Image: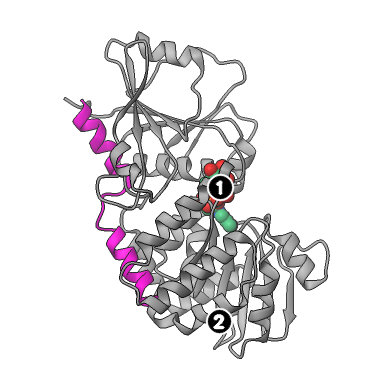
Amino acid sequence: MPQTNPRWDIFCTVVDNFGDIGVTWRLARQLVAEHSVQVRLWVDDLRAFERLCPEIDIQLAQQWQQGVEVRQWPAEWLPVDAADVVIAAFACQLPAPYMDAMAARAQPPLWLNLDYLSAEDWVVGCHGLPSVKYRHVQKYFFFPGFRQDTGGLLRERGLLERRRKFQQDASAQREFLQGLGVDRAPGRQLISLFAYENAGLASWLDCLASDSTPSHMLVPEGRILGDVERWLGVEGLAAGDVHVRDGLTVQVLPFVRQDQYDLLLWSCDFNAVRGEDSFVRAQWAGRPLLWHIYRQDEDIHLDKLEAFLTLYTKGLTRPASEAISGLWRAWNAGVTMSDHWLATRKHSPELQQHAEAWCLEQALQDDLAAALVQFYVNWI
Ligand code: TRH
């Protein structure tokens, strides 16, 4: 029988950027809030965490944030009891003494590797399979995904209802944007830009600047700013800066907490996102999006990109499918975006409808936290 209040340990090593901590922090909060489990989140880089959650005190070895026990993953591991469920996020290596603690339990824990998100076919066959063993403790693969028979996507309870309410409430949107210093002029399309460095950006900005429909691009502080600076011909861009070039206003935003970033995505007509977590959040926003995928060795990320496009573009007319696929491929190749952007703009209404339909279709799946809890219940 499952215990009434099982303990979960989630281990996160921050490889780079914010996706590792972004996913595990979101998952930890949701498990506590919706499944009444106790969660300890072990993080090796509290500075990255602090960007997403400014309340984090980077000096503390142990602290509680939103019901989650946050532990600094120490260089010298101190003995602790292993939890009932142990999640190694993105194949991170657990401390050896902790593995011994898992093996020392009377009832071994459920040990899962929470993998990277991919739309590739093979994920369905591998989700839930046994992986390696440490002594008698079995590890399992747990794959998030877009298809039935995967672990699904992170989606908090009531998220889509909150999103729809916000998108129907013009004054809530205005108030939120004004809080960020953004004045949205009527008739301007609002675009958010969160991406890695990209040589294709200049051609996209050229195109937006010369478009008859004016655009307002919101750029949270981050890696793409160098390319924005080069295009604007300025240096040292920082949050609050606004520059206008013909029909395009470019505004730099502060990096905001995760919940606020959702509101930003919900406010925009089009969102450029990257990595894993912002990519999923843009899908829940129900608005057309552009994905800058995280680069991997031997270009294996390009297979992931194509796998997602194959799924995502089902149901689109051929011209709309070709337009959005062309735009995504150009962005990820860092080549000129102009023709692809113009083609995409032509199919805006269809792409908008499709973004909402895709979001609803994905929401038919169990969310990732619920799927993990169910996996545990079945395993017990
Ligand atoms: O930051 P990312 O590129 O993260 C990752 C890592 O590189 C990781 O190693 C890699 O494996 C993975 O991508 C695929 O992109 P991601 O996943 O979108 O994470 C960004 C997080 O930052 C996400 O949780 C949203 C959040 N965020 C905010 O909270 N506020 C902001 O203002 C912005 C722009 C993002």
Query: Going by the image, does 246 lie left or right of 44?
Result: right
Work out whether residue 30 or residue 107 is closer to the camera in this orientation and state it: 107
The residue under label 2 is 342
Q: Residue type at mark 2?
A: Leu
Q: Residues within 10 Å of mark 1 (few under 14, many from 20)?
A: few
In percent of width and height, residue 348 lies at 45, 80
- Secondary structure of residue under mark 2: helix
Q: Which numbered disc flags the more N-terminal residue, 2 or 1?
A: 1
Query: What stretch of residues is rendered in magenta?
Result: 351-380
Color scheme of the displayed model: one colour
Q: Quadrant of the C terminus?
A: top left
Q: Residue type at mark 1?
A: Asp
Relative to residue 166, is residue 222 depicted above or below? above
Q: How many marks?
A: 2
The rendered magenta stretch, by its main secondary structure, is classed as helix
Relative to residue 194, is residue 251 depicted above or below? below
Residue lying farthest front? 298
Q: Is residue 370 magenta?
A: yes
The residue under label 1 is 299
Which residue is rendered at x = 59% and y = 73% of the image? 178
Which residue is rendered at x = 50% and y = 14% of the image? 96
- Secondary structure of residue under mark 1: helix
Q: CA distance from mark 2 to mark 1?
A: 27 Å
Which residue is rendered at x = 60% and y = 15% of the image? 76
